[in-house]
Amino acid sequence: MAYLGILLTISGALLLSLISPGPNFIIVTSTAMTISRKAGVLIALGLAAASGAWTLLAVGGLALIVTNGGWLYFAIKLVGAIYLIVLGIKMVFGARKPLPQSLDVQRADGLAAMRKGFIVSMTNPKSVAFYGSIFALLVPAHAPTWFYVAIVIISTSLSALWYCGLALLFSQGPIRQTFERFRSVVETTMGLFLVGLGGRLLVNR
C-alpha cells in the first residue's frame, strides 16, 4: 500500500508539471495547428518518449549525477537555451508564411517530428529540475522491480495522453480556422516567448 501511495503522489506531481505551460506545450500545439494533426501527434509521442527517458534517468540516480556533476546540468541548460532560441526565431520568421500544403505536410511527418519533440523535452531545463529533484526524491532507493516499471509506464502514458490530447484538440477545424485568422500574431508571440525563455536561461546560467 505504501508503494501505491507513492505512485499516486508521483502521478499527481507529474500531472501538475505537464499542465503548466512551457516549451513542450508550445511545440505540440503549434505543430498541430500549422502542419497537421499527424505531425502534432508524432511530436507528442516524442515528448512522451522523453518523459520515459527522464524517468529512467531519475530511477537510475539523476539527482545524484546532477548534484555531483554541475557541468552536466550546465551543459543541458546551455543546449536547451540555444535550441529554444533557434526554434523561437524560426517560428517568428515563419509566422507570415502560408500554411504548408499536403505534400509539405508529408515531409514534415515521421521520425523527424518525433525526434524534434524528444529533443525539445530532453533539453528542457524544466524537465531537469523536475525529474532531477522532486521526482527523483520521491522514488524509493530500494523498491521492487514492478514499482520502477510502473513509474516508467505511468510517466510515459500520462505524457502521451496529455500531449496527444493537445494535438488532437488544437488540430480541430474550428480551432485551426480561428488560429489561421490570428496566426501571425499567435506564432510571433509564441516564438518571442521561446526566444525570451532561452535568453533568460543563458543569462541566469
Image (spheres, helix red, strand yellow):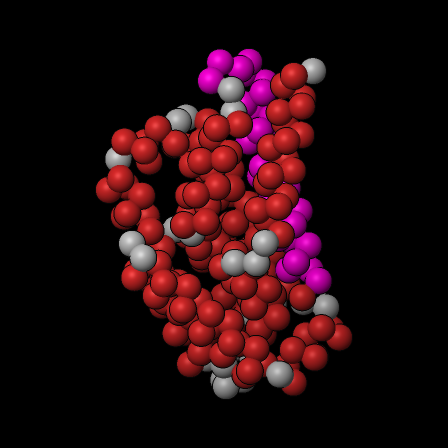
In the figure, residue 155 lies in which quadrant? top right
Horizontal and vertical percent position of residue 98? 54, 84
Whether residue 8 sits left or right of residue 202 in the image: it is right
In the figure, residue 200 lies in which quadrant? bottom left
In the figure, residue 183 lies in which quadrant? bottom right
The single residue placed furthest to the front in the displayed view is 204
Quarter of the image for the N terminus: give it.
top right
Residue 101 seen in render: no
Q: Residue at x 64, y 63 (%)?
A: 37
The single residue placed furthest to the left in the displayed view is 71
Horizontal and vertical percent position of residue 35? 57, 70
- Up the image or down, 75 lies above or below 132; here it is below
Residue 166 seen in render: yes
Q: Residue at x 49, y 13 (%)?
A: 142
Q: Which residues are magenta?
A: 141-169
**Magenta stretch contains residue 187:** no
Q: Residue at x 26, y 35 (%)?
A: 69
Quarter of the image for the C terminus: give it.
bottom left
Number of marks in picture: 0
**Magenta stretch contains residue 154:** yes
Horizontal and vertical percent position of residue 27? 52, 62
Horizontal and vertical percent position of residue 92? 44, 78
Q: Residue at x 44, y 55 (%)?
A: 120
Is 152 in front, or is 75?
75
Whether residue 38 sits left or right of residue 125 in the image: it is right
- Up the image or down, 136 lies above or below 35; here it is above
Judged by its main secondary structure, the magenta piece is helix
